[in-house]
Image (spheres, rainbow, N blue to C red):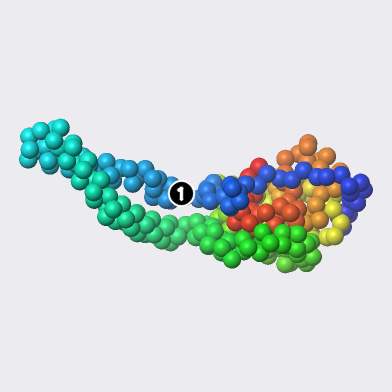
């Protein structure tokens, strides 16, 4: 049975690096290993390209009729400026329709992308709660039973496009969850105790990382890691995620085991 390390609990612990929000808004970039929507990523460039194509076409047509490049450029500029009130909304409607079709296609072809997109959309209802009572949400994570904690962590992992597998017989395997995305693989162990987690659990998990041929090891410990665990982490590569990190991961839109 693993023992918690409760010595010197006043020492602050180092938190793993999670994707940060910009100006108070959750990060919107697609996690590594998932396809990136081309139209959404290049919307501004596409608007400029369409306008350039329209202006070039107008110049070519007017120059062919009038026989003067100067006249063609002047008239093309005037026509484009006058028609922008109609052209710009039409361009944006076309781009939005194309973006919706591309998103639908990506959701059908990539299950991980669909889960990530659903997580983004669900944050609209979660954000007000998180911003209003973040402390209460952190306390919620500390009171979860082991099965519930595993279920909630699996949900956060899936929100970043990971495929999550539960590992039966966790006492023998030393692993609760295995998260995969692209070529990356991470083993996850959940510590649902009120005491801070000690280094013994980390040693088991790191050994399991080799057995599972994983790239990353993640300890989910809402109560946090003990000072001895933090010292051990300086020598070995793994992540420690506490209640505050889990709360932040909900606000961001998921827990990415391959960040940091």
Q: Position of residue 102 (x, y in %)?
A: 38, 56
Compared to 45, does 126 lie above or below?
below
What's the residue at 64%, 58% (across, down)?
Answer: 250
Q: Which of 150 and 49 is in front in this view?
A: 49
Query: Residue 172, image x and y in percent?
Result: 78, 57
Q: In this view, does 174 lie to the left or right of 166?
A: right
Q: Quadrant of the C terminus?
A: top right
Residue situated in front as seen by the camera: 210 or 105:
105
Any part of residue 17 in sight: yes
Using a 10 Å C-alpha cutoff, classify the residue at mark 1 as few (fewer than 14 neighbours), some (14 to 19) or many (20 or more): some
Q: Is residue 214 visible?
A: no
Q: Residue at x 80, y 52 (%)?
A: 224
Residue 67 appears left or right of 33? left
Residue 245: % across, % down: 71, 52
18 displayed left or right of 120:
right
Residue under label 1: 36
Q: Is mark 1 on a helix, strand or loop?
A: loop
Q: In this view, does 146 lie to the left or right of 21?
A: right
- Residue 215: quarter of image: top right
**Near-viewer residue (245 or 192):** 245
Residue pictured at 79% horizontal, 48% vertical: 202
Q: In x, y percent, where is residue 121?
A: 53, 62
Q: In which quarter of the image is the N terminus?
A: bottom right
Q: Which residue is drawn at 87% across and 44% down?
A: 11
Name which quarter of the figure residue 97 lies in: bottom left
């Amino acid at each position: 049975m693993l023992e918690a390390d409760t010595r010197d609990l006043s020492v602050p612990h180092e938190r793993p690096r999670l994707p940060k929000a910009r100006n108070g808004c959750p990060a919107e970039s697609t996690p590594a290993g998932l396809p990136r929507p081309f139209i959404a990523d290049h919307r501004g460039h596409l608007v400029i390209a369409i306008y350039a194509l329209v202006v070039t076409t107008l110049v070519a047509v007017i120059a062919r009729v009038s026989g003067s490049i100067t006249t063609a450029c002047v008239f093309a500029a005037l026509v484009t400026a006058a028609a922008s009130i109609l052209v710009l909304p039409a361009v944006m409607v076309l781009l939005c329709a194309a973006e919706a079709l591309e998103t639908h296609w990506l959701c059908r072809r990539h299950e991980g992308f669909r889960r990530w997109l659903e997580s983004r959309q669900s944050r609209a209802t979660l954000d007000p709660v998180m911003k209003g009572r973040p402390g209460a949400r952190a306390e919620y994570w500390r009171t979860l039973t082991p099965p519930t904690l595993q279920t909630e962590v699996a949900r956060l992992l899936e929100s970043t496009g990971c495929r999550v597998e539960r590992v039966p017989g966790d006492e023998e395997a030393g692993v609760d969850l295995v998260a995969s995305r692209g070529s990356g693989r991470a083993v996850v162990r959940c510590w649902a105790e009120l005491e801070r987690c000690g280094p013994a659990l980390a040693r088991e998990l790191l050994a399991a990382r080799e057995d599972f041929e994983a790239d990353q090891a993640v300890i989910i410990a809402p109560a946090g890691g003990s000072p001895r665990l933090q010292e051990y982490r300086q020598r070995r590569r793994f992540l420690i995620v506490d209640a505050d990190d889990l709360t932040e991961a909900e606000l961001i839109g998921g827990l990415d085991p391959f960040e940091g």
